[in-house]
């Protein structure tokens, strides 16, 4: 660099006021900020499972009614205020859980900001975490629920073979259970199948005492039936434990509800897990 050029630069620097220096420092700070963001954060699409419910999972709020989210379908997208796609519905799992209520699980992919430094995803300026609520608008339909899973794919489902028992039920209930009877979700996917049915006269009667404890009383009366069902159900595994779609742990002694189209297996006791 020529001596005259160096002198001009020095002369220009000497002419800078305090305000000029402040502006220069601010500009340098902004540039440094964006450089840091560029090197530590990047946009990524990530798979997320949302269970439609209230804001606070520990209150175990009731499942939504049948009309909620019935307009949601695969491929629907949500956009930000700039018209950029930020969420897309991959699949909707809609299960009957009795009465007017449904268990609704939505698998999505979200456009998130991934922080390489602390290994977290952010969506809509908030850290994406299991147990936190999310709110979306897909066209005319609103989706509100809790994040239950974050991963590159949706929750991997498996099938579980088990035996359940129902004690002292009405004979017309017992007669409604038939081999190959199936429960399906709203998309027509099989959730549960009855493989075999055994019916006999009731041998015990289950009652509750004044404290709400279950009491089993010897009983024999042909107007009531004991039923043993062999079932194959849709399930998933977390940390080595198996769960039914509604979250029931698949363990001997636990009770399970399964809603078929025209009948229900109500509060059955799991007696075997194959």
Image (cartoon, rainbow, N blue to C red):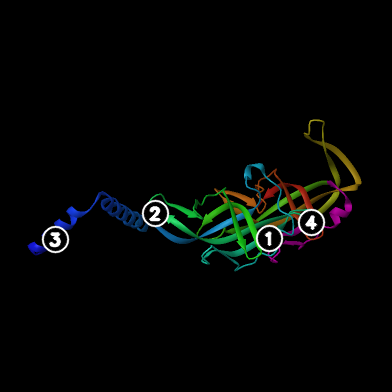
* Residue 169 position in % (x across, y down): 85, 48
* Residue 13 position in % (x across, y down): 18, 55
Q: Is residue 108 magenta?
A: no
Task: For label 4, count other residues whose C-alpha is less than 10 Å away and answer few (under 14), some (14-19) or many (20+).
Answer: some
What span is colored magenta in the figure?
168-196
Task: For label 2, count other residues whose C-alpha is less than 10 Å away and answer few (under 14), some (14-19) or many (20+).
Answer: few
Kindly report the distance in space between the C-alpha atoms of the residues bearing marks 1 and 4. Answer: 35 Å
Task: For label 1, count other residues whose C-alpha is less than 10 Å away and answer few (under 14), some (14-19) or many (20+).
Answer: many
Q: Earlier in the sequence, mark 1 or mark 2?
A: 1
* Residue 149 position in % (x across, y down): 55, 53
Residue 69's disc number: 1
Report which residue position mark 4 lands on.
197
Kindly report the distance in space between the C-alpha atoms of the residues bearing marks 3 and 1. Answer: 69 Å
* Residue 104 position in % (x across, y down): 67, 57
Q: Residue at x 86, y 56 (%)?
A: 175
Left or right of residue 238, residue 161 in this image = right
Report which residue position mark 2 lands on.
116
């Amino acid at each position: 660099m020529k001596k005259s050029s160096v002198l001009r630069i020095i002369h220009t620097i000497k002419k800078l006021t305090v305000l000029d220096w402040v502006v220069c420092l601010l500009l340098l700070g902004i540039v440094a900020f964006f450089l840091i963001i560029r090197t530590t954060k990047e946009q990524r699409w990530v798979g997320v499972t949302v269970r439609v419910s209230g804001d606070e999972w520990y209150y175990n709020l009731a499942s939504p009614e049948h009309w909620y989210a019935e307009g949601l379908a695969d491929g629907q997208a949500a956009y930000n205020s700039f018209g950029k796609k930020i969420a897309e519905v991959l699949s909707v799992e809609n299960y009957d859980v009795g009465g007017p209520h449904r268990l609704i699980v939505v698998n999505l992919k979200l456009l998130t900001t991934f922080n390489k430094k602390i290994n977290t995803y952010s969506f809509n300026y908030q850290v994406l975490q299991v147990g936190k609520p999310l709110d979306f608008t897909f066209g005319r339909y609103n989706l509100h629920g809790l994040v239950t899973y974050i991963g590159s794919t949706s929750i991997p489902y498996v099938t579980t073979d088990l035996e359940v028992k129902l004690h002292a039920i009405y004979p017309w209930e017992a007669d409604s259970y038939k081999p190959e009877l199936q429960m399906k979700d709203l998309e027509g996917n099989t959730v549960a199948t009855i493989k075999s049915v055994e019916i006999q006269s009731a041998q015990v009667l289950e009652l509750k005492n004044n404290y709400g404890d279950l009491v089993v009383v010897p009983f024999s009366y042909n107007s009531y039936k004991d039923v043993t069902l062999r079932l194959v159900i849709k399930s998933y595994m977390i940390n080595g434990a198996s769960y039914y779609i509604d979250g029931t742990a698949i363990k001997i002694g636990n009770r399970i509800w399964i809603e078929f189209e025209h009948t229900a297996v109500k509060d059955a006791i799991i007696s075997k897990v194959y």
